[in-house]
Image: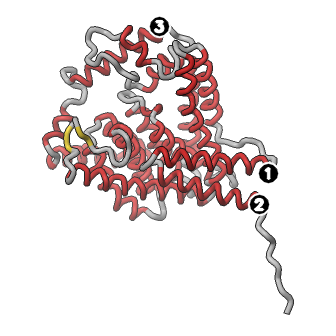
Amino acid sequence: MASVTLPAQLPHDRVELAGIATLMGIVALMQFSIAAAQILLGLALLCWLGLHLARGERLAAPAFFWPLAAYAAATLVSAGFSVDPAVSVVDCKQLVLFLLVPLVYDFARGEGADKLLTIIITVGAASAFIGIVQYGVLNYDNLGRRTQGTLSHWMTYSGTLMLVICASVARLLFGTRDRLWAAFVLPALLVSLALTLTRGAWIGAAAGAAVLFVIKDFRLTALIPLAAVIMLVVAPNELTSRVNSIGDMSDPTTRDRVAMLEAGVAIVRDHPWTGVGPDMIGHVYPDYRTASAVQAHNPHLHNVPMQIAAERGLPALGLWLGFVVSVITGLWRLRQVHGVRPLAAAGLGAMVAMLAAGLTEYNFGDSEFLMLLLVIITLPFAAVRDGRLAR
């Protein structure tokens, strides 16, 4: 009987498998440990670079990556003209995270994109459970000690929960499989987000969900005020008082955010082209602080567009806005592609949530949040990379 010899696996195929496995590890860990996720990111980038060199391939990425890359270049220019270039250049290391876009685009093709979204939702559910335990058992139940999961700050934790909620709602509304799992974990995600007492993330999650409801069926938007009423009826006093403080100018944090915007306008007026430099807002803020400000020092301005304009200049803000428009228009087209709608909807919800929450928090500068956002918005483009986009 003749024997059959199977072809040996090519070295670059093994590198690709290693890259895919490492990317899955990044997605699983980014909601638990930024250090571990970034170590794996370094390994994944080595696999990605080695694969491109072995195959002689050019860099490929979704269209929105190029205005993002231009924004990175503008950031480097800003660092060169910074108030303190040495500090600003070091801060620019975060720009490496932008390489997640071509990395995911290469390693999450086809059905791999949907699997990564499942990992994101599942890990988010585990993170939500930790937050609920912190609140109910460990007394993380007040503004001085708020639930933060395994992350470094409650703002980061609430931001990642917000993105996972958008992904879960998208799969529930537009998915054809795994909808039951999304429905099962969604209540835990919502409860955990509520318990963070983070108003901006509440607004962001509501805005992201509202957009997805409108796309599916406008009548579903009635669920948002209904859910809010139920929450207020059963919620503890600390939570209801946070809801009532939204927009209340007697609230110190609200008043301070308005003062930060006023300081930001003054900074942009004095430094319109390159800003004061990355990581320099905290350095110059005392010079621009208004009389109505509450905090003497603020490391950033709690508003994404204002922070970018003041820190990196108006040209950088224009490039960032170009990135936002490119992402949203690309995802809007992809929502019509069969089999990709849940992924495209998750991306749209995440972007709207980021923009809404970003009016009161500089979430785009938070590494954990940024990594998760970049993965979610790239997945639908990776899913259709080997096919044709519907017109």
Residue 207 visible (yes or no): no
Q: Is residue 141 above or below residue 366?
A: below
- Report the amino acid beneath label 2: Pro
Residue 295, horizontal then vertical, whole percent: 28, 19
**Residue 221, relative to residue 247: is it above or below?**
below
Q: Amino acid at mark 1?
A: Ala
- Alpha-carbon distance for marks 2 and 3? 55 Å
- Mark 3 vs mark 1: in front: 1
Instruction: Say how many tags the image has.
Output: 3
Q: Which mark is residue 269?
A: 3
Q: In terms of sequence position, does the residue under pointer 2 or pointer 3 come before the other?
A: 2
- Residue at mark 2: 11
Which residue has dot 1 on it? Answer: 54
Q: Earlier in the sequence, mark 3 or mark 1?
A: 1
- Residue 15 sits in which quadrant? bottom right
Question: Foreground residue, 119 or 356?
Answer: 119
Nearest-to-viewer mark from 2 and 3: 2
